[in-house]
Image (tube, grey):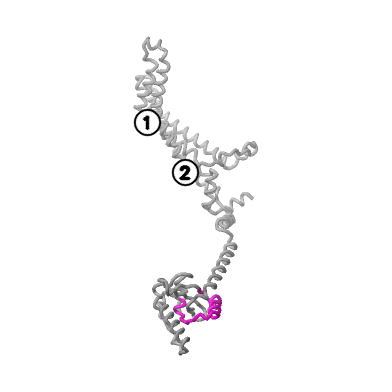
């Protein structure tokens, strides 16, 4: 079952899964890369400041050999010598300590970033189970770590052995050299060996960092079902969202029908579109769309408008343009001012003619730019 589950995990981890893993302290880490950076930083600091380090080392060495008779019988000698030795030792090791400290933080920053998780500090008593521990040791991950350790031992050991073999003549000559020269050559050989050791560790650490990143992404892979379940949790159930949209639409339609009796005119298609306009003559704004609909909703708007004796004007291009360009409750665009003004003027003339008992005026045929009708062009 586990193998089948691993085979099904073919999807890349989502941002939510990566965030949850990071909160648990599960980020890619490479001990080999961190160790290599620490060694390289320490060796580089020693080699770059070797002359200054030698000065402080000689100062510490002289502290035990440069006392007169009066100083030896003085009670203040131990404290003074200890203070001077500590100061020189700090000056000697401070560059190395700072370099290695920076390298300690550089390793995690290069791979997974600095991450602090309280969950990672919580005790896990299941790790005390010896059977589970043996299972982890002989699991694939444990075998991979064992193989890496053996390869590192063989690789680095062989490289250092070749370096020593190449330096055999130099080592034999140290016995016949001056003491100061012998110490300098010995330190130089140790520096080269440390530098080679650090470079090999960096090579191994780089390869291990790539593997750890790949392994971390593989462990966090998800199945298609997990992606669907997560989408439901984060975005909500599609059925519930659809029901919410339906309820919102019903509420908006009820409000629209309540506002419809206040309309001054209803512009129709005549059967498929219906747009109700309201113009406040006392205000400075343009006419507003207070109701609009298509097909069944347009029929309902026409029925309500007919019941409240709202004038209806058949202007198919204008009706479609109003529906396409103007949202509910918004003012009409400037490009439709002339066409809507013709309709409102007709409504005013019709009202006057009805009051006087005259013949109704001819219905307007406002011209509208076809581009304003959107997908509802004639």
Residue for point 40% across, 18% down: 80
Q: Where does the image place residue 310, in percent across and percent down from the top left?
A: 51, 80
Provide the residue designation for mark 1: 47
Q: Quadrant of residue 173?
A: top left
Q: Is residue 297 magenta?
A: yes
- The front one of 201 and 33 is 33
In terms of secondary structure, where does tag 1 sit? helix
Instruction: Give SS at disc 2.
Output: loop
- Where residue 123 sits in the image (x, y, percent)? 60, 38
Percent across and percent down for residue 129 are 64, 37
Decide: is 362 above or below 140: below
Mark 1: give few (<14), some (14-19) or many (20+) Cα within 10 Å: some
Residue 213 on the magenta segment: no
Crowding near the residue tagged with mark 2, few <14, some 14–19, many ≥20 C-alpha atoms within 10 Å: some
Q: Nearer the viewer, residue 329 or 127?
A: 329
- Indicate whether 30 appears above or below 46: below
**Which corner quadrant of the image does residue 362 belong to?**
bottom left
Evaluate whether residue 137 shows in this view: no
- From the viewer's perspective, tell me whether residue 15 is left or right of residue 67: right
Q: Is residue 243 visible?
A: yes
Q: Quadrant of the C terminus?
A: bottom left
| Residue at mark 1 to residue at mark 2: CA–CA distance | 29 Å
Task: Using residue 374 as the reference point, say whether residue 242 is left or right of it.
Answer: right
Please report the residue visible at 43 percent of the width from the left and 37 percent of the height from the top: 103
Closest to the observer, 235 or 58: 235
Left or right: where 230 falls relative to 194: right
For residue 259, side relative to residue 163 (left or right): right
Give the mark nearer the N terminus: 1 vs 2. Answer: 1
The percent coordinates of residue 273 (x first, y second) are 50, 77
Q: Work out whether 170 lies above or below 213.
A: above
Q: Which residues are magenta?
A: 291-320
Q: Please give the residue where the numbered disc 2 appears in the rendered image.
A: 113
């Amino acid at each position: 079952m586990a193998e089948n589950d691993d085979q099904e995990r073919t999807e890349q981890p989502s941002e939510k899964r990566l965030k949850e893993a990071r909160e648990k302290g599960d980020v890619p880490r490479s001990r080999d890369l961190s160790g290599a950076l620490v060694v390289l930083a320490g060796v580089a600091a020693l080699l770059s400041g070797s002359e200054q380090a030698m000065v402080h080392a000689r100062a510490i060495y002289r502290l035990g050999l440069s006392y007169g008779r009066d100083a030896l019988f003085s009670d203040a000698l131990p404290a003074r010598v200890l203070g001077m030795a500590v100061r020189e030792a700090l000056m000697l090791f401070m560059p190395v300590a700072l370099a290695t400290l920076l390298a300690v933080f550089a390793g995690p920053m290069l791979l997974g970033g600095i991450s602090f998780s309280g969950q990672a500090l919580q005790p896990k008593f299941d790790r005390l189970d010896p059977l589970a521990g043996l299972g982890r040791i002989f699991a694939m991950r444990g075998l991979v770590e064992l193989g890496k350790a053996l390869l590192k031992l063989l690789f680095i050991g062989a490289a250092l052995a070749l370096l020593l073999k190449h330096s055999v003549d130099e080592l034999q000559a140290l016995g016949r050299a001056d003491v100061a020269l012998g110490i300098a050559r010995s330190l130089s050989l140790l520096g080269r060996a440390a530098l080679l050791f650090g470079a090999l560790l960096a090579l191994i650490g780089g390869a291990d960092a790539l593997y750890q990143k790949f392994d971390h992404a593989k462990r966090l892979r998800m199945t298609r079902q997990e992606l669907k379940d997560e989408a439901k949790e984060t975005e909500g159930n599609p059925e519930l969202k659809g029901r919410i949209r339906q309820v919102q639409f019903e509420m908006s339609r009820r409000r629209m029908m309540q506002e419809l009796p206040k309309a001054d005119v209803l512009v129709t298609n005549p059967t498929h579109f219906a747009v109700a306009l309201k113009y406040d003559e006392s205000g400075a704004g343009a006419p507003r769309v207070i109701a609009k609909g298509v097909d069944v909703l347009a029929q309902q708007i026409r029925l309500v408008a007919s019941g409240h004796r709202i004038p209806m004007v058949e202007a198919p291009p204008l009706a479609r343009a109003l529906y396409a360009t103007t949202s509910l409750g918004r003012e009409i665009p400037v490009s439709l001012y002339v066409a809507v003004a013709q309709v409102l003027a007709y409504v005013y003339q019709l009202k006057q003619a009805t009051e006087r008992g005259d013949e109704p005026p001819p219905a307007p045929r406002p011209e509208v730019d076809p581009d304003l009708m959107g997908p509802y062009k004639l």
